[in-house]
Image (cartoon, rainbow, N blue to C red):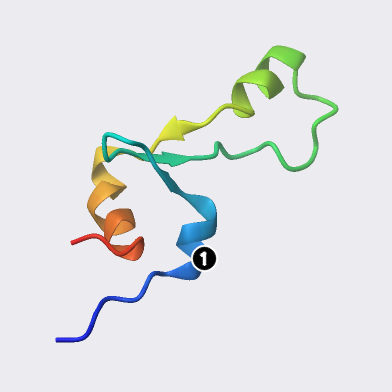
């Protein structure tokens, strides 16, 4: 059976941590920033983990099992 190819669009958007979790960026930080409060924009700048519901699918796209 051939190797699985990495989904390149996903590889640019997600990172694996050392313990095997998957990090993602938060949404809503790209435009229309004037009306968002500084605290909200600061929180949106931080990474967060992929939800349990999406973990398996994203992991497969990154070349996992």
Q: Farthest residue to the top: give it.
A: 39
- Residue reaching furthest to the left: 1
- Residue at the spot x=27%, y=47% of the render? 55
Q: Position of residue 6 (x, y in %)?
A: 38, 70
Q: Quadrant of residue 40?
A: top right
x then y, percent, for residue 4? 27, 76
Q: What is the total number of numbered labels drawn onto the structure image?
A: 1
- Circle 1 packing at 10 Å, graded few (<14), some (14-19), many (20+), is few
**Which residue is painted at 80% across and 31% down in the image?**
33
Q: Is residue 54 above or below residue 50?
A: below
**In the image, is 11 to the left or to the right of 42?**
left
**Horizontal arrangement in the rendering, residue 13 relative to residue 5 (left or right):** right
Please tell me whether residue 42 is drawn above or below residue 27 in the rendered image.
above
Task: State the residue position of label 1.
Answer: 9
Q: Residue at x 25, y 39 (%)?
A: 52
Quadrant showing the C terminus: bottom left
Q: Quadrant of the N terminus?
A: bottom left
Toward which corner of the image does residue 3 lie, by quadrant? bottom left
- Left of 19 or right of it: where is 13? right
Q: Nearer the viewer, residue 53 or 2?
A: 2
Q: Tell me if residue 47 comes above or below residue 10 in the rendering.
A: above
Residue 38 quadrant? top right
Furthest-bottom residue in view?
1
Where does residue 14 sit, x and y in percent of width and height? 46, 49
Question: What kind of element bears circle 1?
Answer: helix
The residue at the far right in this view is 34
């Amino acid at each position: 059976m051939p190797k699985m190819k990495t989904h390149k669009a996903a590889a640019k958007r997600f990172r694996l941590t050392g313990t095997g979790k998957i990090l993602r960026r938060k949404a809503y930080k790209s435009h229309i920033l004037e009306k968002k409060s500084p605290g909200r924009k600061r929180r949106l700048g931080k990474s967060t983990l992929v939800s349990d519901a999406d973990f398996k699918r994203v992991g497969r796209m990154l070349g996992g099992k």
